[in-house]
Amino acid sequence: MTRFLCVFVSGLLVTVFLPACYDDPNRKYALEPLPNVQGGAAEQLAREASPFGDAMVRYLRGKPRKEGNEFILGVRFEPGGFAPRMDTIADIEALLVIMRDYPELRIAIEGHTDNEGDPEKNRKLSQWRADWVRQFLLERGIDAERVTAEGFGDAAPIADNSTAAGQKKNRRLVIRVVNFDSSPMSVKLQGQ
């Protein structure tokens, strides 16, 4: 009797739950956002939360931009430190995801400083900062051939170093897209 009850309950469970698990092999899965999501408040919020990632993905998908192939990482460092503050590495994490999604993408990481202090020390500091980002990517599986790092110190300012605001702009890490395959990694769903 117990065996009969177990077989009956098992059959009942299969009958009830199996149809709920059925996946129609003819069903198409959209990898693009649905029209009512695209351009909506949630997407706008995501763009504002990660402007670096949003701008880079749009560029890689073919949208031209006035800054061209260069993207500034929104990371912050302690004065004289080479490792970013951990609460500011979201852009580096976004870069990691992008590098994984675009397996042919090659980048150059360029470190820059303001003109305070010794120029040679600034160049070394900018190199260490660029190297830190490169190492972060390599330790997470990105092929070393895809990423270079170079420190420029204060040799290429983008703002006036005589003001605090200008110096802040000059202290930056730039990701320059060297080359890429313009389509993201192909994702195939099971049964497709």
Image: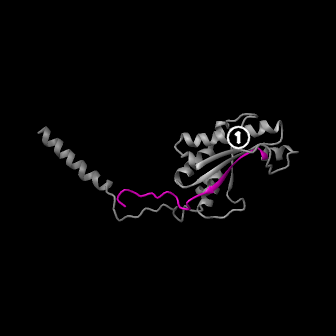
Secondary structure, magenta segment, majority class: loop
Tell me the crowding category of disc 1: few under 14, some 14 to 19, or many 20 or more residues within 10 angstroms, Cα based. Answer: many
Q: Is residue 3 left or right of residue 117?
A: left
* Amino acid bearing label 1: Gln
Identify the image quadrant of the C terminus. Answer: bottom left
Q: Please, which residue is most extreme toward the left here? A: 1
Position of 170 relative to 69 (above/below): above
Residue 177: in magenta span:
yes
Instruction: Point out residue 67 in the picture as x, y percentages from the top left corner.
Output: 72, 59
Q: Toward which corner of the image does residue 58 lie, by quadrant?
A: bottom right
Instruction: Point out residue 85 in the picture as x, y percentages from the top left corner.
Output: 67, 36
Nearer to me, 16 or 156: 156
Identify the image quadrant of the N terminus. Answer: top left
Instruction: Point out residue 132 in the picture as x, y percentages from the top left corner.
Output: 64, 39
Position of 188 relative to 125 (above/below): below
State the extent of the magenta-drawn residues as a range. 170-192
Residue ID at (46%, 62%): 30
Residue ID at (82%, 50%): 159
Task: Label 1, secondary structure: give it.
Answer: helix
Residue ID at (32%, 54%): 21
Instruction: Point out residue 150 in the picture as x, y percentages from the top left corner.
Output: 69, 45
Residue 144: in magenta span:
no
Nearer to me, 13 or 97: 97
Q: Which residue is mark 1?
A: 127
Q: Is residue 93 left or right of residue 6?
A: right
